[in-house]
Image: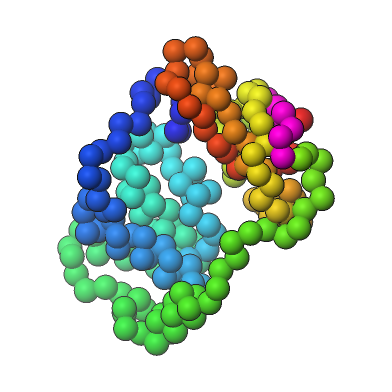
Amino acid sequence: MGGMHGFGPVEPEAGEPVFHEPWEGRVVGLMIGTGAAGLRRGSIRPAIERIDPATYLASSYYERWARSVEAGLVGAGTLTEAEIDARAATGGARPARLEHDSPELVAPIRAFLDSPQPTSGAPAAGAFAVGDRVTVRRMAPEGHHRCPRYVRGATGTVARIEGAWPHPGDDRPEAVYSVRFANADLWGDDAEPGSVTVDLWERYLT
């Protein structure tokens, strides 16, 4: 939703904390832990995109994360919706399957946190080079994707080549580019000065 017309500018909060409430940090921990332990099915973003619009708009950022984690736990058969609802309604004991000190949960989380994670993609022989002017295709992709609506149809400059990464739903690596767009090219001449850089798969660009 960032950058969509009608939602106003993002107003930075002076001295903004990492988390406004303790539960927000716990949601991040749950996302990492349940994924590392194989307790959750799917990635977080597609599940967020499937939240019905009214609930999505009424939810805060980490409330959407929490709903996505819950959907993944149910989808994997780790918990049922009834177990989650009962815990939320009564504050009762957590299901035994998810005891926080369970070796089945702790070991894979520790292995995940201790292992080096990739910071760059595979070498890519892409169609574009740094400095090229590229235009984002006008499209309405089905399913999960990573092309913000507000850059579709806009023209920008390739600032960096990020290597090759599999596109969502596709195992084959594809070149990804960091493309810099002038604010005025996205939101008109009355936009504040500056630019926005967006990582985009090659299939989105011409």
Color style of the picture: rainbow
Nearer to the camera, 189 or 94: 189
Residue sitting at x 50%, y 75%: 112
Which quadrant is home to the N terminus?
top left
Nearer to the camera, 91 or 36: 36
Give coordinates of residue 194: x percent, y percent: 48, 27
Residue sitting at x 30%, y 31%: 11
Furthest-bottom residue in this view:
103
**Quadrant of the rendered image containing residue 131:** top right
**Quadrant of the rendered image containing residue 205:** top right
Give coordinates of residue 39: x percent, y percent: 47, 71
Residue sitting at x 32%, y 66%: 83
Q: Give the range drawn in magenta.
A: 130-139
Count all numbered tags in the image, as a single digit. 0
Which quadrant is home to the C terminus?
top right
Give coordinates of residue 47: x percent, y percent: 49, 50
Residue 63 visible: yes
Residue sitting at x 31%, y 79%: 99
Q: In this view, does 172 lie to the left or right of 153?
A: right
Residue 133 among those drawn in magenta: yes
Q: In this view, does 77 lie to the left or right of 92?
A: right
Q: In this view, does 3 lie to the left or right of 182?
A: left
Most frequent secondary structure within the magenta stretch: loop
Residue 44 among those drawn in magenta: no
Furthest-top residue in this view:
189
